[in-house]
Amino acid sequence: MRDKKDLRIVFFGTPGFAACSLQAMIDKGFNVVAVVTAPDKPAGRGYKLQASAVKDCAVKNHLPVLQPVNLKSEEFLTQLRSYNADIQVVIAFRMLPEAVWNMPPLGTFNLHASYLPHYRGAAPINRAIMNGETETGVTTFFLKHEIDTGNIILQEKIHILPEDNAGTLHDRLMTRGAELVIQSLELILSGNYELKPQAPGDFPHAPKIFTDDCQIRWDFPAIKVHNLVRGLSPYPAAFTFFQDKKLKVFETEISGEKSSVPGLIEIRNNKLLAHCRDFIIELKDVQAEGKKRMPARDFINGLHLTH
């Protein structure tokens, strides 16, 4: 078995989900020789350049950072080759060209936040909850041409709890995913592992979330609306319109009361109630346009003060 210090690793990733695995690799003594992440982006009111969570982690641990705009540029490819990586690990990063993922002798593997082949695509955490799933998972697999279709190294199922939203599930998958990355690297180091091809068939997909996906349809059943809100909370957040202004909704509860007019939103007994196709749903945590996120009760009190 090779020593982990002899395995040269280049890590690709951008958000906190990826940074968790990077830190775990460093903590476990793996030899990360360079980190590739997105260029700094303007953020906040002052549009100051903000580094990614992965860059912050790399800088804190004194690792070289590459931030290419073009992954196919000869300058970047030459720079990448200079690190002589044995293997590359990619998590929550953009699509890699073959010239990149096929570069190291041991290949490039990815951590995906679903139990593949279920929920291939950009938004597996959101889509699983939006579709009312009760379980999902994490999977490590080697990259090949078709997105999220490579041979599986390891995977594990994780329950989606009724009280979960995209944020809480993200955090659990992030932590368990980091452990799976470590286990995968240790297996690869041992040389004693078997890859598992992904099962053929028609499985649910996880396309990117767009604004249209976030607008609540009140002609849907209450459970579908409830799962939409859970699957988009806290970000990017489901929304509707109330008194001609956009209202983001972060938490709902289905009541046992039958609805009358789908789309009607009313204030009753100091509660914000919305009528779906079948049942009334209570909007419990909201954010009005130009305001902070708040409990619905505070939102209602603000309306009373205004009027």
Image (spheres, helix red, strand yellow):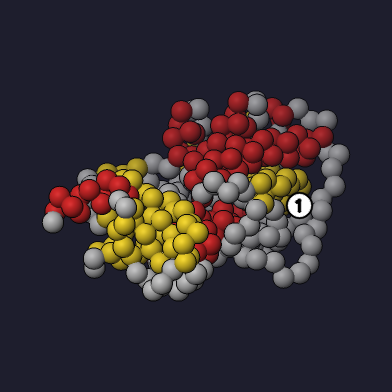
Q: Horizontal and vertical percent for residue 200?
A: 78, 67
Q: 208 left or right of 27?
A: left
Of the pair 182 and 129, the residue shown nearer to us:
129
Q: Percent x, y for residue 153?
A: 76, 47
Please say whether residue 299 is visible from this viewpoint: yes
With 127 as the anchor, is 287 left or right in this view?
left
Indicate the amino acid at tag 1.
Ile
Q: Along the line of sight, which residue is nearer the eye, 141 or 131?
A: 131
Considering the image in quadrants, where does the N terminus appear?
Answer: top right
Residue holding disc 1 = 152
Q: Residue at x 47, y 72 (%)?
A: 277
Give SS at disc 1: strand
Tell me where residue 241 sits by quadrant: bottom left
Residue 299 relative to residue 236: left or right: left
Residue at screen point 46% across, 53% down = 253
The quarter of the rendered structure image containing the C terminus is bottom left
Q: Nearer the viewer, residue 215 or 281?
A: 281
Relative height, residue 278 to residue 152 (above, below): below
> Does residue 144 show up?
no
Q: Residue at x 55, y 36 (%)?
A: 20
The residue positioned 41% from the left and 56% from the top of the image is: 282
